[in-house]
Each structure stands twice: as structure tokens, then as C-alpha cells.
Image: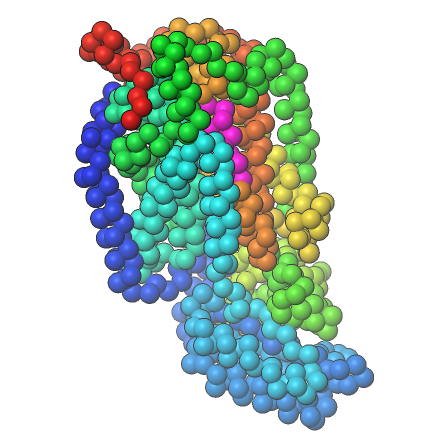
């Protein structure tokens, strides 16, 4: 592989005009496709095999006009102190608001009158209007949302407090600010790392081109493949991350080859042949992690995984072709002014080699080699302590109670809780597949269960063969008590009774994700273990990589639980309401962090493997790997932490949680696992780290990641003294 990539890198360098033209054309083609494609509606969300989904399917068949899976909103009215919502003037104001809601949009399916459906609190101080829509929250038009927001304007003028809750106000979280912060920090880190604006700009430019092609392609195909807006958000986040990483690896190796005196074309070929091999296998591990999301069997997640994997493949191809092409344009400017002056001084002195001062990576590696046991214990015990809260992990989906108190959704949630009880924010929908007698029996059974605040009479369809019963729990939607109530209803009633609604759907979704976690982890780690065994020609190195990754992910989950579930340091991160951890979080972290962790592992350890294969002792190989790779891995990790940390400032609890979790996970994996635990373990193992049974060595394909075959071929072909020449151009 190294030989093929070497030739590819040299070819791209020589034919830089053609390569650049091809990528610009692809970007333009994808952009035109995205601009001309029909506007995609929101991706349909379904959870095959769950009871909540079966109930929705039954409702769609028996209650086609009910819009069971459509968006909902609640307009909550509260009277001033000492007044009641039953006052004639207030009733008239609410009645007018109900009329405005019914006529405000053709997407409205139904609007209830609080005075006819008993939606007035016992003390008379609070009332709410329930609004149901024909489409889900992401398909609502801006005009519909605006009509909803303006509903209570006149009521507020009359002295009433009006707040609006429900998923009708939910929109795709804006992530632009987080990405901009990440790109700015990435630019600063790259300038510090390379000491050259040109070298720093290349990874940013190519990452943006790759993300542009990937996201534009997703947008162009969104309508045809039913891809939601979250698909492009994930692809953008992952594509930006790996695109910068991979380009950073190639550019760094290119500069190292130049420093050894090679011509620019030769340096580009060797950079792609060596660091490019690491990029290929690092990219494959990310693709495995993302495509593996299909194991969860949730169509939306599967599509997100495949789309993001496609963006990663684009990032790999760009690193292998466009980067060497752009290096051809960069000339001597890819090397910082300070480095150029040092090279010129060395040449002027007759080419005498100047002993370079050991960099931070070299000093750290030597420190770890002196105290491997102490470093290993500190790293493992430290991450283990942080991981302890993960044992108390409770999964669910945040509701409006997790919103900031400054939002109308949160204020509506609090008003409903005060006036009608916490459970009124998440009523359960019970669907009875049977006649009136069966529905009445179900009502009786449910009333006898713990945790039930109220049960409405059955509402049958026209045929009389299906009924809907609304059950109001005593506790808030995301609580363990409400989850237990859902299970109790399902256990108590027969197979013809199905529990659904947003709360039940969240519970089923969380269970589905929980059940899929171990199979997904086994698939991803297992396939990556085999892949890394091919790369490193070792059994223990991939095993250490997998175990280190698991340790960092569990520690990151522990930190997420401590902050978002327990509330530790919650005010520091803007957490206003603790609650269950988003059910997608563990699998999402496994997929994303695994890919990034293997990037760092492959790049750092392949350089060690390369040095070991070329004759260095195990300890020397570790120092060599850190001398060349530590600075680059550190820069890549800081960039990723900055990208993810930029999302912590979001007002959306879910986005905040994702940003915090990924930032912490990358920090733990890059700086504790890869930079401390990995060299400590390799130091203790010595030559045994690179042991591979002979029969397995014969069975595994030899991909020559470390470039040994390439070096022999180049040594045989190179004329005497013709290869090493310090380049000044």
C-alpha cells in the first residue's frame, strides 16, 4: 500500500492543475445539485419493532385524520393573582385565541377549547389550549410557527400570562456559531503548530472543501433518500473533524521529509506513502464505526451513519490527492520562515548537521520510559475515578423541563406543572384495538395502577373498533416513575392495548438504544481490532488500543452523568435542570470518539512501528514516534476539543450535552490514553508489544503501512547522492 500511495502522491504533485480542477469541479457539481434539488421535508422517524411504533401505525390506519404522530403545542394561560381564568373577560380572550389558532394555518388538525375539555386547573388560575398539527414539528412552516407565537399577544395585553410549549416550536438547533469558533481555534492552533500561514491554511481549506462536497451531496439527495437535516449536521461535524486531522498528518509528514533534505515531489510522495497509509486505515475505522450504526435498526440513524461515512471517505481521498497537489502550489512557503532560515544557515555552514533541541514530545516520552508503572497507574486510576458515575447512568430524552428558564417552552412547562401536576406535560396515549367494552375495561385497569393522576374516557373511531385513552401520570415525563407506569400499563393490559405518545416513544427509543449498545460495541471494536492487527502486525497493540478507548469513553460518560444527571458543576456549563442522559449519547459517543481515537492511535503508533521495523529498539521507537507525532496529535486533539466545546454554549440541552461529552472524551483519549497510557504500556511490554504468531502473520495481508517495502524499493532505484538535497524552492 505504501508504494501505491507514494506513486499517487507524486502523481498528484506533478499533475496538480488537473487534480485541483477535478476537486473544484466536484464541489461545483455538488453545489449545483444541492441548489437545484427540491426542498426536503423532515426525515420520517420510526422505531421498528417497538410498541409505540405499532400504536402509531395502528392509529394511522384506524384514525387517519387524527395526525397521531403530528406536532403538538400547548398555549398556557395564567390569570393574575386573585383572578381566575373562568372570569367572563378571560374566557372571551381565550375563546378569541382558540379561533385565531384554528384559522391561523392549514397545517392545524385540531384545537381544543379548555372550557369544554376540562383543561382549567382546580384553583381556576391556569388553563391551556391543546393544538394538534397534521405534520411533525420539522415539517411545520415558518408561517405556522409565527401564527402560534403571536396567538397570545392580545391576551398578554389584557394582563394574562401566556406561554407556549410542545414540540411545535422545536427547530433544528443552530450550530453555525460552534463551527465558526472551532474553525477559528483550529486556525490558531495550526499556525502555532506549523509556524506558517500557508501550512496552517491547507488543512482548513481542504476540510472545508470536503465538507462542502459531502454536505452538498447530502442536501441534493435528501428528498430522494428521505434524509433529515440532522444528517447533514452530523456529516458536517465529523467531516470537519477528520478532514482537518488527515490533512494535518500529511502536511506534517511532508515538512518532516523536506527537513531531511528531500526534493518537494519526493517529499510529497513519501508523505502520502507513509502518513497516507495511516490516514487510510484511520479513515476505515471511522467508516466502520459510522456504518455500524445500522446495527441499532433505526432507519434515521442508519442513514445518518452512511451519509457521515461518505463524508469521511471524501476527506480521505482529499488528503491523498488534493493535499499533495496544493503542496505543489505552496512552494517554500509551506515551511515557516524560522525553519527556512535554519536550513539556509545549515547549508551555508557546509551542510553540517546541527543537533536539534529535544522537543516536548521527546522529553515526555523519555519521562514515561523512566516511570512507566507510575504513569500507567495514574492514568488508569484517574480515568477509573471519573468513570464511577457512569454506573448510575439513566437514559431518556430531555423534555421542555430541560430548557433554559428564559424560554417560553420552559415557562409553559412550569405553569402546567404548578397548575395541573408534572405529569400533564407528558400524557400517555393508550390505543385499544377492540370495542367499547374492551376500552372500558382498560380504563378500569389503568385507574388501579400507581402513578396515575387522571384517565380520560375512551374516544372511539367511527367504526367503533379502536379507541384512544389519555393517561396523565403523576410525575414528569422524563422521570423513572413515569417510565415504570408505562411498563405497568403494558404488563397489566393485554396484547390489544398499546401505549404510545411522545413519552412512551422516548422510553422505547431509550430501550432500543440500550439494547443495541453492546452488539454495536462488539461489532465496531471487533472489526477495528482486526483492522489494527493488519496495520500493526501485532495482537497486543490493537488490544491495548481497544481497551484504552473503552476506558476513555466510560470516563467521558461518567463526566456527563456527573454534570447533566447529578448536577455537579452544572452552573458552570449552563445546566439549569438535571435529568436523564440523552439515550443516543452512549452509542453516539462510541461511534464518533472511536473514529477520532483510532486516528490518534494509528498516526502515533505507526510512526513507532515504522521506527521499530527500521531497526530501532522498542524504547527508541517510542521516543521517535513521540518526537514526530506528539505535536501533531496534540494539535489535532486541541482542534477537535475546540470544535466540540463550541457547542456547549448552545441553549439546547441535547446539543450542550453532545458538545460536552465529545470534548471531554477527546481530551481523555488523546491526552490520557494515547499520550500517557499507550507509551507506558508499550514501554512495559518491550519487544512483546510487536509479537504476532507466525501462522497469523502468514494469514494476514501485508499492507506495508510502515513503508519498509517502499524504502527498499527507493533505495534500490535511487542514484548515489541523487535523492538527498536540501530544497530551498
* Main secondary structure type of the part rendered in magenta: helix
Residue 121 quadrant: bottom right
Residue 342: in sight, yes or no?
Answer: yes
Q: Look at the image and give the residue range highlighted in magenta.
A: 629-641
Q: Position of residue 56 (x, y in %)?
A: 46, 64
At horizontal 63% and vertical 74% (from top left) the residue drawn is: 163
At horizontal 22% and vertical 7% (from top left) the residue drawn is: 720
Label tally: 0
The residue closer to the viewer here, 492 or 727, is 727
Q: Position of residue 126 (x, y in %)?
A: 71, 79
**In the shown orientation, is residue 222 left or right of residue 664?**
left
**In the shown orientation, is residue 702 left or right of residue 668?**
left
In the rendered image of this protein, does residue 173 appear above or below residue 78? above
Residue 548 quadrant: top right
In the rendered image of this protein, does residue 399 appear above or below residue 692? below
At horizontal 65% and vertical 78% (from top left) the residue drawn is: 162
Residue 459 quadrant: bottom right
Quadrant (top left, top right, bottom left, bottom right) of the N terminus: top left
Q: Position of residue 673 (x, y in %)?
A: 56, 26
Quadrant (top left, top right, bottom left, bottom right) of the C terminus: top left
Residue 533: in sight, yes or no?
Answer: no
In the rendered image of this protein, does residue 610 appear above or below residue 19? above
The residue closer to the viewer here, 698 or 487, is 698
Q: Is residue 660 magenta?
A: no
At horizontal 21% and vertical 43% (from top left) the residue drawn is: 22
Amino acid at each position: 500500500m505504501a508504494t501505491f500511495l507514494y506513486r499517487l502522491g507524486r502523481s498528484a504533485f506533478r499533475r496538480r492543475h488537473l487534480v485541483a480542477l477535478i476537486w473544484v469541479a466536484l464541489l461545483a457539481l455538488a453545489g449545483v445539485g444541492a441548489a437545484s434539488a427540491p426542498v426536503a421535508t423532515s426525515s420520517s422517524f420510526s422505531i421498528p419493532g417497538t410498541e409505540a411504533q405499532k400504536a402509531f401505525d395502528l392509529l394511522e390506519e384506524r384514525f387517519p385524520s387524527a395526525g397521531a404522530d403530528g406536532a403538538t403545542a400547548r398555549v398556557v394561560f395564567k390569570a393574575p393573582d386573585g383572578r381566575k381564568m373562568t372570569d367572563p373577560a378571560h374566557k372571551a380572550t381565550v375563546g378569541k385565541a382558540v379561533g385565531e389558532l384554528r384559522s391561523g394555518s392549514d397545517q392545524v388538525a385540531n384545537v381544543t377549547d379548555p372550557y369544554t375539555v376540562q383543561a382549567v386547573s382546580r384553583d381556576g388560575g391556569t388553563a391551556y389550549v391543546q393544538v394538534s398539527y397534521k405534520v411533525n414539528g420539522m415539517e411545520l412552516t415558518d408561517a405556522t410557527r409565527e401564527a402560534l407565537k403571536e396567538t397570545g399577544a392580545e391576551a398578554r395585553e389584557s394582563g394574562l400570562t401566556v406561554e407556549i410549549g410542545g414540540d411545535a416550536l422545536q427547530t433544528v438547533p443552530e450550530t453555525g456559531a460552534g463551527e465558526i469558533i472551532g474553525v477559528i481555534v483550529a486556525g490558531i492552533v495550526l499556525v502555532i503548530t506549523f509556524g506558517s500561514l500557508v501550512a496552517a491554511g491547507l488543512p482548513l481549506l481542504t476540510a472545508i472543501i470536503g465538507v462542502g462536497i459531502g454536505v452538498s451531496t447530502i442536501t441534493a439527495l435528501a428528498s430522494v433518500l428521505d434524509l433529515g437535516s440532522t444528517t447533514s449536521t452530523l456529516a458536517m461535524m465529523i467531516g470537519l473533524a477528520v478532514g482537518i486531522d488527515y490533512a494535518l498528518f500529511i502536511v506534517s509528514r511532508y515538512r518532516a521529509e523536506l527537513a531531511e533534505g528531500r526534493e518537494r515531489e519526493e517529499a510529497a510522495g513519501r508523505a502520502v506513502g507513509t502518513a497516507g497509509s495511516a490516514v487510510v486505515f484511520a479513515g476505515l475505522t471511522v467508516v466502520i464505526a459510522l456504518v455500524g450504526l445500522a446495527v441499532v435498526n433505526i432507519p434515521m440513524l442508519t442513514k445518518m451513519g452512511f451519509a457521515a461515512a461518505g463524508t469521511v471517505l471524501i476527506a480521505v481521498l482529499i488528503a491523498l490527492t488534493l493535499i499533495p497537489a496544493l503542496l505543489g502550489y505552496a512552494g517554500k512557503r509551506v515551511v515557516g520562515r524560522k525553519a527556512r532560515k535554519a536550513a539556509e544557515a545549515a547549508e551555508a555552514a557546509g551542510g553540517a548537521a546541527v543537533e536539534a533541541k529535544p522537543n516536548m514530545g521527546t522529553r515526555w516520552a523519555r519521562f514515561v520510559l523512566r516511570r512507566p508503572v507510575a504513569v500507567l497507574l495514574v492514568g488508569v486510576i484517574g480515568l477509573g475515578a471519573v468513570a464511577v458515575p457512569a454506573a448510575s447512568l439513566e437514559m431518556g430524552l430531555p423534555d421542555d423541563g430541560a430548557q433554559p428558564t428564559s424560554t417560553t417552552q420552559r415557562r409553559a412547562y412550569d405553569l402546567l406543572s404548578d397548575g395541573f401536576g408534572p405529569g400533564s406535560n407528558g400524557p400517555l396515549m393508550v390505543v385499544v384495538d377492540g370495542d367499547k367494552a374492551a376500552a372500558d375495561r382498560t380504563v378500569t385497569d389503568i385507574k388501579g395502577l400507581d402513578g396515575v393522576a387522571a384517565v380520560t374516557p375512551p374516544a372511539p373511531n367511527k367504526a367503533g373498533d379502536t379507541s384512544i385513552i389519555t393517561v396523565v401520570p403523576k410525575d414528569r415525563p422524563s422521570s423513572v416513575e413515569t417510565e415504570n407506569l408505562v411498563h405497568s400499563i403494558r404488563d397489566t393490559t393485554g396484547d390489544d392495548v398499546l401505549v404510545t405518545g411522545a413519552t412512551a416513544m422516548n422510553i422505547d427509543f431509550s430501550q432500543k438504544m440500550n439494547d443495541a449498545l453492546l452488539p454495536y460495541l462488539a461489532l465496531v471494536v471487533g472489526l477495528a481490532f482486526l483492522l489494527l492487527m493488519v496495520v500493526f502486525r501485532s495482537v497486543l497493540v490493537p488490544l491495548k488500543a481497544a481497551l484504552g478507548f473503552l476506558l476513555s469513553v466510560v470516563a467521558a460518560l461518567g463526566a456527563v452523568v456527573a454534570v447533566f444527571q447529578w448536577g455537579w458543576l452544572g452552573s458552570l456549563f449552563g445546566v439549569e435542570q438535571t435529568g436523564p442522559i440523552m439515550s443516543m449519547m452512549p452509542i453516539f459517543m462510541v461511534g464518533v470518539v472511536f473514529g477520532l481515537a483510532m486516528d490518534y492511535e494509528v498516526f502515533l503508533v505507526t510512526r513507532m512501528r515504522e521506527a521499530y521495523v527500521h531497526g530501532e529498539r522498542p524504547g527508541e521507537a517510542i521516543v521517535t514516534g513521540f518526537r514526530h507525532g506528539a505535536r501533531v496529535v496534540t494539535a489535532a486533539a486541541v482542534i477537535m476539543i475546540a470544535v466540540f466545546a463550541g457547542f456547549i454554549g448552545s441553549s439546547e440541552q441535547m446539543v450542550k450535552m453532545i458538545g460536552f461529552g465529545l470534548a471531554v472524551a477527546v481530551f481523555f483519549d488523546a491526552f490520557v490514553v494515547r499520550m500517557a497510557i499507550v507509551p507506558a504500556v508499550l514501554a512495559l511490554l518491550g519487544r512483546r508489544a510487536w509479537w504476532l504468531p507466525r501462522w497469523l502473520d502468514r494469514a494476514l495481508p501485508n499492507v506495508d503501512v510502515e513503508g519498509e517495502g517502499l524504502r527498499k524499493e527507493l533505495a534500490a532505484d535511487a542514484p548515489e547522492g541523487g535523492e538527498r538535497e536540501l530544497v530551498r524552492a
